[in-house]
């Protein structure tokens, strides 16, 4: 099993709107692709000078399924997020293997 982790620092002036959009639109759209088994969104508990950081985790059954998602869906969904919250966030992605 693979966890596709997306860590996002979002500016506080749009944080509540972003969080609602993530829960009601973006995460459901990612799940509708059929490539992930489950998801969770977590607030990263650190004191920060700017913004608030979240970890969005999607569980996938294999690297093959994740790579398929990245080819077929990720560019469109990332662009939608980037267009909606331009200059209001920074993000990075990491992969974890469940042992």
Image (tube, rainbow, N blue to C red):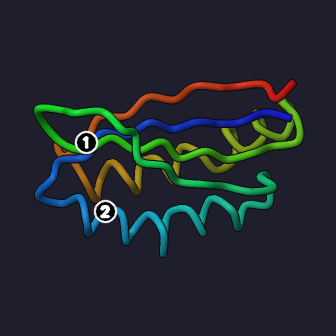
Q: Is residue 10 above or below residue 84?
A: above
Are circles 2 and 1 on residues that touch, CB within 8 Å?
A: yes
Judged from this view, the residue extending furthest toward the bottom is 24
Mark linked to residue 18: 2
Helix, strand or loop at disc 2?
Answer: helix
Q: Is residue 26 above or below residue 47?
A: below
Mark linked to residue 1: none
Q: Is residue 96 above or below residue 36?
A: above
> Which residue is at 67% across, 47% downward?
58
Residue in the foreground of this view, choosing between 53 and 46: 46
> Which residue is at 19% across, 32% downward?
48
Helix, strand or loop at disc 1?
Answer: strand
> Which residue is at 53% across, 47% downward?
56
Residue in the foreground of this view, choosing between 83 and 30: 30
> Which residue is at 78% across, 33% downward?
2
- The residue that label 1 is drawn on is 89
- Residue 30 shown left or right of residue 51 in the figure: right
Q: Is residue 23 above or below residue 69?
A: below
- Residue 25 shown left or right of residue 83 in the figure: right
Dividing the picture into quadrants, the one containing residue 68 is top right
């Amino acid at each position: 099993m693979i966890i596709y982790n997306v860590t996002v620092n979002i500016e506080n002036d749009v944080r509540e709107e972003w969080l609602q959009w993530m829960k009601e639109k973006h995460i459901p759209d990612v799940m509708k692709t059929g490539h992930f088994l489950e998801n969770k969104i977590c607030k990263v508990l650190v004191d920060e000078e700017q913004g608030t950081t979240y970890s969005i985790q999607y569980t996938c059954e294999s690297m093959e399924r994740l790579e398929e998602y990245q080819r077929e869906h990720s560019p469109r969904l990332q662009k939608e997020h980037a267009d909606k919250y331009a200059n209001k966030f920074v993000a990075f992605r990491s992969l974890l293997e469940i042992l």
